[in-house]
Image: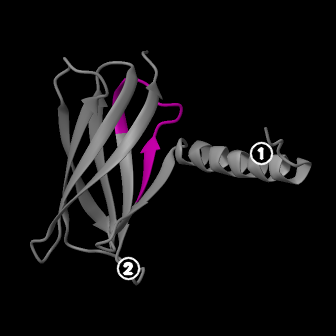
């Protein structure tokens, strides 16, 4: 039986701590999603803490060169993370160059998944997902 060296144990602990910190950072109200297509969508959901009722999604869309993505159509779909709940729908509209905002009404507390169905100005269709944890019931 081979025992791990103290340095090996410290390195493993450091990797675990950094990985956990990265996961916790993604759980906040700001998220950015980057995919191979180069589209980056930064999102903020308000109000915080999240609770049932109307929530506002503020989105910032950029291309791979960090230029604002304008003229996109963004349809929003909110689904509970468990089956049996009807989805809720909304639309985000462009209120400044590359900045979009939309509203969803979340009728139940719990964990939600928000799907963004994005149609770019050139007709390309892209989907993104935001995991929303711990919406509180009013």
Name the residue at 42% across, 54% down: 43
Q: Residue furthest left?
A: 123
**Dividing the picture into quarters, in which one does residue 60 lie?**
bottom left
Q: Quadrant of the C terminus?
A: top left
- Whole-angstrom CA distance, mark 1 to mark 2, is 34 Å
Is disc 1 surrounded by few (<14), some (14 to 19) or many (20+) residues within 10 Å? few
User: Residue reaching furthest right?
Assistant: 6
Whole-percent x, y for residue 25 in the image: 60, 48
**Mark 1 falls on what kind of element?**
helix
* In the rendered image, the vertical position of residue 83 relative to residue 103, given as above or below: above
Which residue is farthest front? 1
Dot 2: element = loop
Q: Which residue is mark 1?
A: 13
Colour approach in the figure: one colour
Labels 1, 2: front one: 1
Q: Is residue 34 above or below residue 65?
A: above
127 or 97: nearer the viewer: 127
Residue at screen point 79% across, 38% down:
1
Q: Nearer the viewer, residue 110 or 98?
A: 110
Q: Position of residue 26 (x, y in %)?
A: 53, 47
Is 47 colored magenta in this rendering?
Answer: yes
Mark 1 or mark 2: which comes first in sequence?
A: 1
Q: Which residues are magenta?
A: 42-55
Of the pair 57 and 85, the residue shown nearer to us: 85
Is there CB contact under 8 Å for labels 1 and 2?
no
Q: Which residue is mark 2?
A: 64
> Which class describes the residues within 10 Å of circle 2: few (<14), some (14-19), or many (20+)?
some
Q: Residue at x 83, y 41 (%)?
A: 3
Percent across and percent down for residue 113 are 32, 37
Q: Is residue 31 magenta?
A: no
């Amino acid at each position: 039986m081979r025992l791990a060296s103290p340095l090996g144990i410290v390195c493993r602990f450091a990797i675990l701590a950094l990985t956990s910190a990265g996961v916790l950072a993604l759980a906040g109200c700001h998220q950015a999603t980057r995919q191979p297509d180069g589209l980056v969508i930064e999102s903020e959901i308000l109000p915080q803490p999240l609770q049932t009722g109307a929530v506002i999604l503020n989105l910032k869309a950029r291309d791979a060169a960090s230029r604002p993505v304008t003229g996109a159509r963004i349809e929003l779909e909110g689904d509970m993370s468990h089956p049996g709940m009807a989805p809720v729908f909304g639309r985000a509209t462009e209120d400044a160059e590359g900045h979009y905002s939309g509203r969803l009404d979340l009728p139940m507390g719990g964990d939600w998944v928000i799907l963004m169905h994005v149609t770019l100005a050139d007709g390309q269709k892209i989907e993104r997902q935001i995991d929303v944890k711990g919406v509180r019931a009013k």
